[in-house]
Image: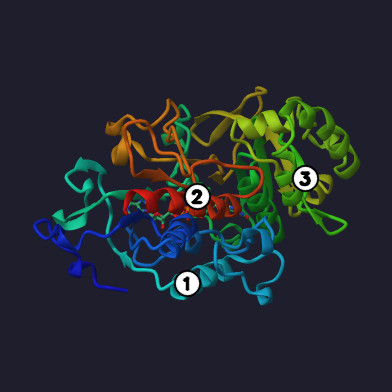
């Protein structure tokens, strides 16, 4: 990869690439590859020292919940040797192979601070006072950009260890310890299971809204494939049918403190909550190795107060409480974000008054983000090739 210092300096915008992609995760790499396939020369800027930084930082046992075949990015299959559910290290290996296969021009160690309107279309002040320009910019800085821990009252009085799930690697540091995992999305559910298997002394799982739980695969049919089919159906129909399927495939865990959800599966997806794919949670709850408890309300010293009035005194709290998009500083001043900080347009559409400014990876679809980013990449490239011509 080129040395960042070889980038064109503020005065030297002559080397303006046809397009600049911000972020070398799967979304940015897919967009860059598709742009190249459409004859557009993209430069990818990545703030970390290596591409695929988010995946390098995920916990050790993580595997894609989406299948190898349905997670491939445009123009390169994921090797069969990586298995049906690709592990974290193989995802990173695939991203490296992908960048090499498509001869992508990636500069690492460069943070783009802001996207500004400029003579070349867009100007990007970046690390070290450099300014780069291009008529096309693809923002691919990640849905899971900035770890978020709720501002629980009394949080700072907790004498134990409080960390975000993004800092969790494996169970080793928690062997024999009393741990409260907060949040039952896919990450919280899997970390709770990992802690049990890794010998934590006690594992509780704080649940605000009971999740929809799906088997990752039933008789060989992946849950992701159902997710893809479901996207074509009216949400109300899905919400009427889903409870029957859930009852057939997932046992009732109410007696263990995890009731069935009251709101519809698709209604929750539209609200941003993807169903939890079971990678051991059901067994762990049924064997009472993971104890569901009520949501966290506040901290008071070593006591964590829960929404049902009970208290817990864990040694460690792991907040699997999600991420923020973190787009405000980058593009907030352009009026291209909605009230939740998400881009008002994504894929091939650009926000009103912002031609050439594309976003990828800012939705959380039930059909799998790798798959959607792969589809968006082609659409963005087609639209961008019309601009940079
Ligand atoms: C634990 C976990 C498991 C997941 N499992 C799956 C799965 O099984 N299947 C699936 O389809 N999806 C999954 N996803 C969702 C999604 O596919 C991944 O989050 C994926 O990494 C998103 O790709 P991305 O390129 O949009 O963002 P990222 O991978 O986060 O990449 C964004 C890149 O942009 C860089 N960057 C950020 N800001 C700047 C800046 N200002 N300047 C320069 N560079 C910047 C970052 O360093 C990073 O490298 C999972 C997500 C998580 C958190």
Residue 200 appears in the picture as rendered: no
Earlier sequence position, callout 1 versus callout 2: 1
Q: Position of residue 155 (x, y in %)?
A: 45, 34
From what the image shows, is residue 294 above or below residue 136? above
Q: Position of residue 106 (x, y in %)?
A: 34, 66
Residue 163 appears in the picture as rendered: yes
Q: Name the residue under label 1.
A: 96
Front in this rendered view, residue 31 or 327: 31
Q: Does the residue labelled 3 lie within 8 Å of ligand 1?
A: no
Point out the frontmost of discs 1 and 2.
Answer: 2
How far apart marks 1 and 2 lie (CA) works out to 23 Å
Earlier sequence position, callout 3 versus callout 1: 1
Q: Mark 2 points at which residue?
A: 379
From what the image shows, is residue 63 above or below residue 386? below
Q: Residue furthest right?
A: 248
Point out the frontmost of discs 2 and 3.
Answer: 2
Label 3 crowding class (10 Å Cα cut-off): few <14, some 14-19, many 20+? many
Q: Name the residue under label 3.
A: 214
Lateral position of residue 249 relative to residue 380, left or right:
right
Q: Is mark 2 within 8 Å of ligand 1?
A: no
Earlier sequence position, callout 2 versus callout 3: 3
**Residue at image location 71% in from the left, 60% down from the top:** 197
Front in this rendered view, residue 146 or 257: 146
């Amino acid at each position: 990869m080129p040395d960042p210092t070889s980038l064109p300096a503020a005065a030297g915008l002559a080397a303006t690439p046809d397009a600049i992609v911000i972020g070398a995760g799967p979304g940015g790499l897919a967009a860059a590859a598709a742009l190249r396939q459409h004859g557009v020369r993209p430069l990818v800027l990545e703030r970390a020292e290596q591409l695929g930084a988010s995946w390098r930082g995920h916990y050790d046992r993580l595997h894609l919940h989406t299948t190898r075949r349905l997670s491939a990015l445009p123009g390169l299959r994921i090797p069969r040797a990586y298995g049906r559910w690709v592990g974290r290290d193989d995802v990173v290996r695939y991203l490296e192979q992908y960048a090499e296969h498509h001869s992508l021009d990636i500069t690492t160690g460069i943070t783009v601070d802001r996207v500004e309107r400029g003579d070349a279309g867009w100007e990007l002040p970046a690390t070290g006072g450099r300014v780069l320009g291009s008529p096309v910019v693809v923002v691919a800085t990640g849905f899971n950009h900035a770890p978020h821990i709720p501002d629980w009252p009394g949080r700072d009085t907790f004498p134990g260890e409080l960390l975000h799930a993004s800092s969790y690697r494996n169970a080793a540091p928690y062997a024999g310890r009393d741990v409260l995992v907060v949040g039952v999305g896919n990450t919280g559910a899997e970390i709770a299971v990992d802690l049990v298997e890794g010998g934590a002394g006690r594992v509780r799982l704080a649940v605000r809204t009971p999740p929809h739980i799906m088997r990752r695969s039933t008789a060989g049919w992946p849950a992701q494939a159902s997710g893809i089919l479901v996207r074509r159906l009216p949400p109300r129909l899905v919400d009427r049918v889903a409870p029957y399927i859930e009852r057939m495939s997932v046992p009732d865990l109410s007696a263990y403190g995890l009731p069935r959800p009251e709101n519809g599966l698709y209604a929750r997806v539209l609200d941003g909550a993807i169903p939890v794919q079971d990678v051991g949670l059901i067994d762990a709850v049924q064997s009472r190795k993971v104890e569901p408890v009520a949501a966290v309300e506040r901290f008071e010293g070593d006591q964590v107060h829960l929404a049902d009035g009970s208290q817990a005194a864990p040694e460690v709290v792991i907040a699997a409480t999600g991420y923020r998009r973190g787009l405000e500083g980058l593009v907030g001043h352009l009026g291209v974000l909605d009230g939740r900080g998400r881009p008002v347009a994504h894929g091939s559409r650009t926000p009103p008054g912002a031609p050439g400014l594309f976003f990828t990876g800012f939705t959380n679809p039930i059909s799998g983000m790798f798959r959607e980013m792969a589809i968006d990449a082609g659409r963005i490239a087609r639209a961008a090739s019309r601009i940079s011509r």
